[in-house]
Image (cartoon, rainbow, N blue to C red):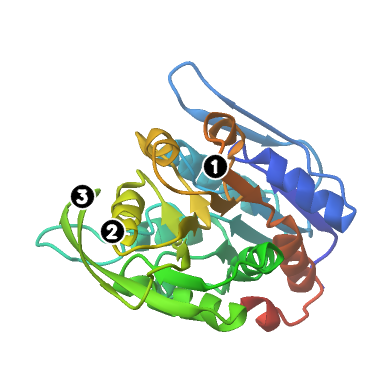
Amino acid sequence: MYGPLKIFSGRAHPGLTNEICARLGVEPGHMTLYSFADGENYCQIDENVRGADVFVIQPTCPPVNDHVMELLIMLDAFKRSSARRVTAVIPYYGYARQDRKDKPRVPITSKLVADLITAAGADRVLTLDLHASQIQGFFNIPVDHLFAAPVIVGHLKKLDLPDLTIVSPDAGGVERARAYAKRLGASLAIIDKRRVAANQTEVMNIIGDVTDRNVFIVDDIIDTAGTLIHSVEALLKQGARSISASCTHAVLSGPAVSRINGSALDQVVTTNSMPTADKEAECSKLRTLSIADLLGEAINRIHNEDSVSSLFEM
């Protein structure tokens, strides 16, 4: 119905695109992408896409603004080149944390970015572990929202940790942590934290028993790792036997790597929703799992007009 399947990559994460294409048995599409001396982005599609079912893979990871702009330019190029359908595959959706007016006179930037992606020519969006699920409603086009939980839970099952407790680092992540605990047969604990300022938190209480337990903290994003380290310190005070963590998106900006290296964490498990090779070289505790199979299966089902609902399940 939508013509041949074609998968293209921006410059944010070509390695993930190559993995997905290898899984699906297709060649990555050919594009010319570069920046002019003044920072403007240039894009040219180097093959015919008229009538094609195009998937553009571009996580909006740091530098966020550059990758968002490049995504918009690519979407516009495909729309003007008469692609039958264009799907923006955004494994990491930048600006997702600015999803509401929590202070006077502030923007809802995640809604603005959703409007820009739609206006640029996307017919649908495929994304992974949005910071807030209601961001799907910011789009007026179909959104397929996948979860990395099957990949991370599968890894945890292989570790087979005894006396396991899954910990949510805040109240907002309880649903995610509960889903992990249920599938692993583990107990659940919650950290009640108070945010003092941007990127600064103060841990208040731990709800649940972590004494002499193997603890695994589950979050969607690790940015500066301030919240994570505060959580680790609080769990140690409560007598945790060992502490590990996982996240879907390892932003790891600023002092994050040095904080993790200097902490009592045994390991931090993440996915390749954004490039992590440089971070892994600096942080021996970081372990990256591939989401190429998950995204590849979703792309294949969308292209063939099959149901993807089973892939939404935690």
Which residue is label 1 attached to? Answer: 285
For disc 3, the neighbor class at 10 Å (few under 14, some 14 to 19, many from 20) is few
Q: What's the mark number on residue 237?
A: 2
Q: What's the mark number on residue 96?
A: none
Q: Amino acid at mark 1?
A: Lys
Query: What quarter of the picture does the C terminus occupy?
Result: bottom right
The disc, 1 or 3, on the residue closer to the chain's N-terminal end is: 3
Residue drawn 49% across the image and 56% down it: 244
Query: What quarter of the picture does the N terminus occupy?
Result: bottom right
Q: Amino acid at mark 2?
A: Lys
Q: Quick check: 173 above or below 32?
A: below
Query: Disc 1 to disc 2, how far (Cα)?
Result: 22 Å
Query: Disc 1 to disc 3, how far (Cα)?
Result: 26 Å
Q: Amino acid at mark 3?
A: Ala
Q: Total marks drawn? A: 3
For disc 1, the neighbor class at 10 Å (few under 14, some 14 to 19, many from 20) is some
Please, which residue is most extreme toward the left here? 104
Which residue is label 3 attached to? Answer: 198
